[in-house]
Amino acid sequence: MEGKKVKRSVKLGVAAAVAIVVAGVSIYATSVSADESITESEAKQIALSEVKGADISHITKFQKDKDDGRTEYDVEIIYDGYEYDFEISAKDGKIFDRSKEKADAKDLAEAEAKAPVANESNSGESKTVVVDQSSSSSSDYSNSGSSSEISLEEAKSIALSQVSGASKGNITKAEKDYDDGRAEYEIEIEYNGYEYEFEISASSGNILSKDVDRIDDDDWDDRYDD
């Protein structure tokens, strides 16, 4: 009889311990959830709402961080020549800190280089279209010179749309070429100390490649020292 009481006491003790552990886990999960009720997507939209005209493609930095035990999102946006930085609470979306300063040439060039070439739907707008890799090179070649191709001037406009502030006077090279039987335009733009090179499909206007390089002072001297 005494043995049965001991076994029953042990079972009750184990059950109580399990209940305490479960309750602890539940409380911890609730506290974590309460501390991070704002999602990453919501944090991005909160920051973007503070920069009129900017969209998701202008976010150049985004990360979750801890500051004094407080979970927050660090968001950086480069838009229209300025750099915006925000610290946003992951708990309630409150903006703890914000700053705005003129973006330097390096930051602007890096932001341009990071800009997605593929189509990203945001507010129904897109600067470029998805590169159609499924089309055969012979198809592009057979259409060369046809009315379905974009013109050289249209290719220039597409390239200029990727370099904020540049104009046609900054275009240093614009020519039509063929790569593996595929008609394309090669456009080079020099602006604000950087050289931008684009390969644009003549059949669709898609940007096939985009490169950005800094122009050294020696390069500038060689180009204009006659």
Image (spheres, helix red, strand yellow):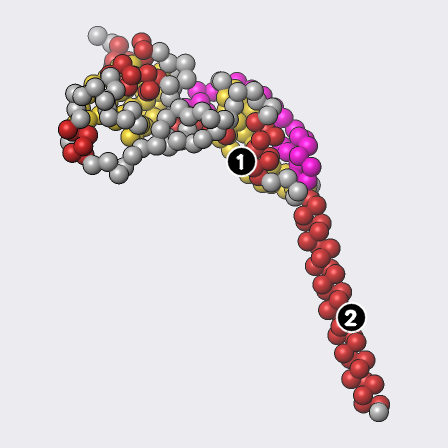
Does 86 appear above or below 103? Answer: below
Identify the residue position indicated by label 1 in the image: 62
- Identify which residue is drawn at 24% across, 17% down: 151
Label 2 packing within 10 angstroms: few (<14), some (14-19), many (20+): few
Say which residue appears at 54% left-offset and 29% top-offset.
76
Q: Is residue 204 magenta?
A: no
Q: Is residue 10 visible?
A: yes
Cα distance between the residues tagged 2 and 1:
44 Å
The dot on residue 16 is 2
Residue type for callout 2: Ala
Q: Which of the 4 quarters of the picture holds residue 152?
A: top left
Any part of residue 190 in sight:
no
100 or 10, nearer to the observer: 10
2 or 1: tag closer to the N-terminus: 2
**Residue 108 shown in magenta:** yes
Q: Which residues are magenta?
A: 85-110
Q: Position of residue 212 (x, y in %)?
A: 34, 26
User: Viewed as shown, does residue 27 lie left or right of 86?
Assistant: right
Q: Is residue 70 left or right of residue 175?
A: right
Tag shown at residue 103: none
Q: Is residue 118 left or right of residue 19?
A: left
Closer to the eye: label 2 or 1: 2
Residue 61 place in picture, x, y as percent:
51, 33
Amino acid type, residue under disc 1 in the picture: Phe
Q: Residue 7: image x %, image y %? A: 78, 84
Q: Quadrant of residue 18?
A: bottom right
The crowding category of the residue bearing disc 1, from other C-alpha atoms within 10 Å (few below 14, some 14 to 19, many at least 20), is: some
Q: Indicate the quadrant containing the N terminus: top left, top right, bottom left or bottom right.
A: bottom right
